[in-house]
Every structure is written in C-alpha cells, then in structure tokens.
Amino acid sequence: MEILHPNIRFEITASSCVLPDSPPVTNLDILQNFPRTSSHSLSFLEKFAEKIGEEFGFYSRYWCHKPWESLDNSRGLTAESLAIESVQKLLAQYTPQKIDAFLLGSTTNKRFTGSQAAAVLGHLGLDAPAYDLKTGCSTSLSTLHLGYALMALGYSNILVCCAETLSKVIDPENEKTWIGLADGAAALFMEKKATGSFTVEKTFFSTEGKYVEAFTTQGVFPPTKEQIDTPGYHLIGDESLMKELAYTKYQQILNNLLPTEEDRSAITWVIPHQVNRKLITQLLQENQMENKSIIWDSDAIGNIGGASVLYSLARAVNEKIFDQPGKILLMSVGGGLSYAGQVLQFHKP
C-alpha cells in the first residue's frame, strides 16, 4: 500500500448535494411492497421496519426507481441527470471563469461507450477535459485522488462530481439491496491555493482484482437476452466475503495511513463509505479512535455507493461542520475490489 504525500493546499469554493426529487422511501414502504413481507399485518411490519433501522442503520432512502414499478417510469432519471443537476446547483453558487478539468465518478453510468462526463458538460454548454471513473464504492475517493494528481500536474482547479442510481440495479429477490441501496449525487469545485482551507496530506487508492466478482453486476456487453431476463443486471455478490474483506482492508488503511498513536489522535472527523455503521464503529473502537466525530448520512439517505463519501464531504462543507482546525480521515472499501484512504488537514475555523 503506497501512501502518497502530495501536501497540496486547496479551497473548496463551492459544493452541492442532490437527491432524487421524490419523497423518501421508508423501511415500512419497502416491507409493504417486498413480495415476501407484503402480506403481513401493519403492526408486524412497523416493528420489523424499526428493527431493520436499528440493525442496519438505514431508515429511509431516495430512489429514482422503485423496484415494484416498471423501469419505464424512471427511464429519464439517470446518474447522468443527477450529475447535471448537481453541477448546475454548484454553478448557481459560484461560476468560475474557467474549468480546468471535470471528473465524474459513477458505477451506474448511463452510457456503455460514450463519456458520461463529457455528456454532462455538453448539456451545460461547457468545454473542458472530462474524465469518467468507476471504482465501486471507492469511486468518491478515486475521483478525488485523480483530482489531486491533476492539480499536481498543473491544473489550477478541478470540478469533481459523483452520481449514482443504484435503485436501478436492486436485486428484486434480495431484500438487503432494497434496504441499503439508494441514489444521489454531489459535486465540489476545488481550487489550488496557497491559502486554501484544506491540505491533502496523505492519499492512496488501490484495487485487488481477484475479488472483482465479490460484489458486482454480472451482465455483459452487449447484453444477452438470457441475462436481461434474469438477475444479470442486478447487484449481487458474496455479502459475508465482502464484510470480511472490508474489515481487513479498513484495518490496513488505518495501519498505513495512521501508523502511530499521535497520527490517530490528530484525527477530528471521519467520513467513511456508508454501508455498515456497526463495522465502522467497531474499527474505530479497536483502534482507539472511538471519540472521533463520524460524518454519516446513510441513516436518512441510504447507501449511495460510489457517491457516498463525496456527498458527506460536500454536506459537511455546506453546513460548516468543519468548525475548527483539525484533520479529516476519508476511507472506503468497495467492489472491484477497491480501497482508498485520505487524510486532509482543515486549517480555518
């Protein structure tokens, strides 16, 4: 695990968060529509819904597509449309003279061959180098990682966006994907500045390809009729293996990014990928970091996959959660197998 120390200082000049424009879907909504639970009494489902929230940490989420409805109802709602909305919202706050580069991360890309990043800029009438990234649930951090690299290369600013529509790959037979998966997007405009509020002190991103099938959609391109008619384009995998891998990789991340007690005590905020709050709490306790402030959104919006870390970072910037000088630990493990970690120094209260 090679840790880079770029020490690039930058400002997050603007940020935005976007969710599908529809009411939140609660645990009770899911249970009332999931085939194996829909026939139970309301009182039973209400108790079950609360138990799900306590066990998994998910109480509501936002979907472009409800799995009990036809996909035709949400055909126009895509990761691309959420990305467009997120970038538009950001540019309404701040309009730069020039965008040096645009990075768009998504595991649910609308386009098989065309660039979704270029399409977003094209829709907005903008021209810039545009890059697409897809690295499982580590997509937020791989996108930021490349953003730092481009700033080191000489770009003065980077527009970063991550967007997901995981509701469209929910497995209709697996209630855990109904409970956990969700949709959303976020965007940041980062400007390299000697007086910026953030310094990226440490960053790394890597993959372990032998586990590429551990959690994925198995459909191929071009699609076969057999796979379209079966769960070939639904998110499936070995949940026990992924939990084991996540624990192992997170321990490696903490051991390598924060090797000393001094490194760990210096962390003020933690923004992890948001699929398992119990696992994150356990890891922080085992590493004497249980007093850190965890920035967490999935209890209210669900797991938005590759966009989750960027969403929470953007929300923290918007809501001025970083209210004192301190360090931010960002970390993720996702399908691919991908894993990433970063330490940012926040300078200004």
Image: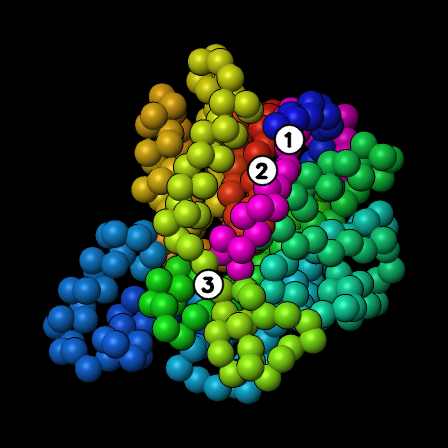
Give the mark toward the camera: 2 or 3. 3
Judge whether residue 83 can be spotted in this image: yes
- Between 242 and 111, the residue placed more toward the observer is 242
Is residue 106 inside the magenta stretch?
A: no
The spot of residue 206 in percent (x, y) is 63, 38
Classify 23 as above or below 268. below
Helix, strand or loop for disc 3: strand
Verify CB contact (< 8 Å) between mark 1 and mark 2: yes
Residue depicted at 39% across the width and 53% down the height:
239
- Distance, label 1 to label 2, CA atoms, is 8 Å
Q: Which residue is mark 2?
A: 340
Q: Which amino acid, by three-letter code, is at mark 1?
A: Thr
Classify 8 as above or below 96. above
Residue depicted at 64% across the width and 70% down the height:
220
Q: Quadrant of the C terminus?
A: top right
Q: Which residue is mark 1?
A: 203
Disc nearer the start of the sequence (3/1): 1
Q: Is residue 298 left or right of residue 255?
A: left
The spot of residue 126 in percent (x, y) is 84, 62
- Distance, label 2 to label 3, CA atoms, is 22 Å
Within 10 angstroms of label 3, few (less than 14), some, or many (20 or more) residues? some
Is residue 206 inside the magenta stretch?
A: yes
Within 10 angstroms of label 1, few (less than 14), some, or many (20 or more) residues? many
Q: Which amino acid, by three-letter code, is at mark 3?
A: Ile
Q: Which amino acid, by three-letter code, is at mark 2?
A: Ala
Give the mark toward the camera: 3 or 1. 3
Residue depicted at 48% across the width and 45% down the height:
273
Q: Which residue is mark 3?
A: 236
- Between 94 and 297, the residue placed more toward the observer is 297
Magenta stretch: give its range: 191-216
Disc nearer the start of the sequence (2/3): 3
